[in-house]
Image (cartoon, rainbow, N blue to C red):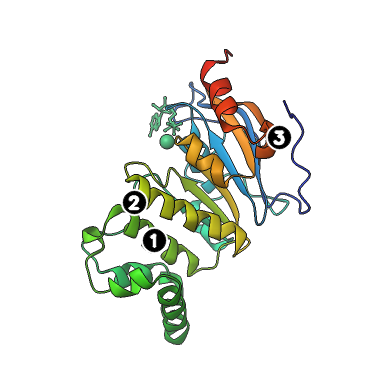
């Protein structure tokens, strides 16, 4: 089993180093958890329900201040930096539950992605046009309340909105939870595109191991708040069945 980080050409853009974090002072949910994300690559954190995957993303994005350990962005220590600053530093966070305002139009949701730049009307218009070119469905639905769109379409809007600020890192929490299999394939294609076409560093958290591993470069298997095994996806022999079995049946 590989224990060394992958020898990807570029250094990690985002790294969690031995993070310890939780919601109350006496209970640590993350216990010395370390993960990395590289430009143009997808790192995937898999593990059982309740193991701390969402907590990890919240700690990385600054919703939770780690008790110990560090968060490094492009080599700089950003541990405990609040979410609005992380956003400005080029980190996008797509939470487990869709984060659109359901009663606002799709376009209003997109504009909120550029809230900080709203006086720069020409820039906002340009970014909107780009989002519409990239996502024809989003263009088609731009006047509808976001809450009326299907789950997959809402994910597209979220991704379109996030791209308006041109982030370099994506933290994505279970993007296909509760979505039908065909839509799910579309969403994974979008996530894959973020890395392959747009060179984003993606840290994906997923319970749908088999599907997620299909687009993943580097895998972290997490149990009870700590990394239990990790390595390049192909280091697991490309054999996702074996990885799933190992994850499900291994003790420890
Ligand atoms: N807001 C919260 N306050 C207190 N405990 C929480 C909160 N959110 C999650 N937890 C607890 O943290 C642990 C890890 O949860 P979570 O990170 O959501 O797991 P996962 O995403 O892997 O399913 C669970 O025991 C959960 O009950
Ligand atoms: Mg979760």
Residues packed near mark 3 inside 10 Å, few (<14), some (14 to 19) or many (20 plus): some
Toward the viewer: 4 or 161?
4
Can you say whether 6 is above or below 1 in the image?
below
* Lower sequence index among marks 2 and 3: 2
Q: Which residue is mark 1?
A: 156
Residue holding disc 3: 235
* Apparent side of residue 10 relative to residue 58 in the rendered image (left or right): right
* SS assignment at label 3: helix
Query: Residue under circle 2?
Result: 98
Task: Determine the CA span between mark 1 and mark 3.
Answer: 31 Å
Judge depth for marks 1 and 2 and give the one in front: 1
- Residue 246 position within the rendered picture, expressed as x and y whole percent measured from the top left: 58, 21
Which residue is depicted at the point 65% across and 57% down?
40
Q: Is residue 19 left or right of residue 64?
A: right
Q: Quadrant of the C terminus?
A: top right
When the figure is inspected, residue 117 is found, relative to residue 150, above or below; the finding is below
Q: Check whether the beta carbons of the residues at disc 1 and disc 3 lie within 8 A of each other.
A: no
**Residue 39's x, y, as percent?**
67, 56
Q: CA distance from mark 1 to mark 2?
A: 10 Å
Q: Earlier in the sequence, mark 1 or mark 2?
A: 2
Secondary structure of residue under mark 1 = helix
Return the residue nearer the eye: 100 or 144. 144
Label 1 vs 3, first from the N-terminus: 1
Could you tell me residue 211's position as x and y percent?
48, 41
Q: Residue at x 34, y 55 (%)?
A: 152
Whether residue 67 can be seen here: no
SS of the residue at dot 2?
Answer: loop
Q: Are marks 1 and 2 in contact (CB under 8 Å)?
A: no
Point out the quarter of the image occupied by ligand 2.
Answer: top left
Q: Using the image as rendered, state which of residue 59 and residue 4 is in the foreground.
A: 4
Mark closer to the observer (2, 3): 3
């Amino acid at each position: 089993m590989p224990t060394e980080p992958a020898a990807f050409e570029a250094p990690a853009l985002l790294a969690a180093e031995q993070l310890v974090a939780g919601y109350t002072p006496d209970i640590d949910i993350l216990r010395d958890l370390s993960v990395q994300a590289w430009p143009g690559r997808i790192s995937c954190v898999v593990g059982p329900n309740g193991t701390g995957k969402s907590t990890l993303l919240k700690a990385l994005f600054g919703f939770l201040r780690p008790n110990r350990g560090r968060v490094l962005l492009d080599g700089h220590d950003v541990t405990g930096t609040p979410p609005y600053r992380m956003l400005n530093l080029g980190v996008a966070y797509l939470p487990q539950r869709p984060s659109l305002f359901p009663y606002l139009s799709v376009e209003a949701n997109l504009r909120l992605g550029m809230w900080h730049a709203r006086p720069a009307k020409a820039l906002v218009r340009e970014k909107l046009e780009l989002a519409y070119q990239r996502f024809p469905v989003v263009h088609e639905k731009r006047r509808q309340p976001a809450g009326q769109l299907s789950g997959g379409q809402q994910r597209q809007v979220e991704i379109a909105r996030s791209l308006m600020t041109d982030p370099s890192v994506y933290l994505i929490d279970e993007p296909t939870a509760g979505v039908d299999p065909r839509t799910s394939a579309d969403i994974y294609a979008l996530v894959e595109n973020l890395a392959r076409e747009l060179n984003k560093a993606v840290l994906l958290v997923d319970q749908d191991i088999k599907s997620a591993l299909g687009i993943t470069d580097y895998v972290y298997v997490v149990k009870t708040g700590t990394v239990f095994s990790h390595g390049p996806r192909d280091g697991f022999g490309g054999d996702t069945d074996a990885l799933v079995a190992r994850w499900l049946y291994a003790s420890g």
